[in-house]
Image (cartoon, rainbow, N blue to C red):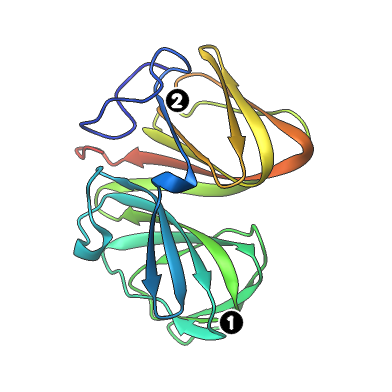
Amino acid sequence: MKGKSVYPGSEPAGAGRMGVFRKLRPADYTVSAWSGGTTTQIAIAPEGARYAERDFLWRVSSATVELEESDFTPLPDYLRQIATLEGEITLRHNGGAPLRLRPYEVHAFDGADDTHSVGRCRDFNLMLRRDAAEGEMEALRLDGRYVVAPDPGTETLLLFCAEGGCTVTDPGGRETLQAGETLLLTPSAPLTLEPEHGGARLMLCRIRRRIGQNL
C-alpha cells in the first residue's frame, strides 16, 4: 500500500508496517460545541484546514444532537453524507417529504439544502467539496471476515470503529481498531477485516480527488 501520505504534506505514521496509514485515537480528535450539542472532528484534509473557514476539501466528523429539533448549517460548497450511530432522526430538505434515518443508514444530500432535523442522536458525517473531491460512505457490520477490495481511484480510505473491535490486515501488516478509533489509509491492496469477540460496527469512507484536483 505504498503511495503518498494520507495527509498531503505530512509523513505517514505507519509507513513500512501496513503501507501508508495513520491511526487516530479520540485524543487526536478536535471537539467543539454547537448550539445543539458537540461536534468531534475526526479528520480533515488538507491537514491544518479549518472547518470555520470552509477551506477544506473533505471532513469526517461525529456530532451529538441533544435538541429535539435543529437546523443544519448551510454548506453550499459541499456535498454531504450522514448516518446515525445512536438514535433515529427525521430529515426534511427544502420543506420536502420527511425522511426517517435509522442507525447506520447512510443518506446523501446537498449541503446547500435547507435541512431540518427532528430527533436526538449521535451521528457520523462525510463532507466533500463539490468541485474537488468525491466519495462514498457505508456502514459495515462485522460478524465474520470481510474483505475491502481496493478501488483504483480511491486516494484515502477511512475506517472508523463505532462499536466493538476488529483487526485490519493487508500484505504489509496488521492493526487493531477499538471503538472510537480511526484508521486512515492510502489503499493499494485488499484489506481483511476480522471482528473481535462480539462483532464490530464500522463506518467506511472512500475519498478520491476529481480530475485536476489535489487532495
Q: Quadrant of residue 197?
A: top right
The reply to whether residue 64 is in sight is yes
Q: Is residue 26 left or right of residue 209?
A: right
- Numbered disc in front, either 2 or 1: 2
Residue 142 visible (yes or no): no
Q: Amino acid at mark 1?
A: Pro
Q: Secondary structure at mark 2?
A: loop
Decide: is 204 above or below 105.
above
Judge by depth and name the residue closer to the eye, 164 or 113. Answer: 164
Tell me the residue at 27%/25% (across/down): 11
- Say which residue appears at 45% left-offset and 20% top-offset: 188
Q: Are marks 2 and 1 in contact (CB under 8 Å)?
A: no
Q: Determine whether, in the image, residue 172 is placed left or right of residue 134.
A: right
Q: Position of residue 180 (x, y in %)?
A: 56, 47
- The three-letter amino acid code for the residue at tag 2 is Pro
Tag 1 or tag 2, which sits nearer the N-term?
1
Q: Is 118 located above or below residue 156 in the figure? A: below
Quarter holding the N terminus is top left
Residue 195 percent across, percent down from the top left: 72, 33
The answer to which quarter of the image holds residue 213 is top left
- Would you identify the image quadrant in which residue 168 lies? top right
- Mark 1, residue position: 98
Which residue does the image show at 59% across and 21% down from the upper left? 169
Q: Regarding mark 1 in the picture, which secondary structure is present there?
A: loop
Q: Label 1 neighbourhood size at 10 Å, few (<14), some (14-19), many (20+)?
A: some
Q: Tag 2: Cα neighbours inside 10 Å, few (<14), some, or many (≥20)?
A: many
Residue on which disc 2 sits? 187
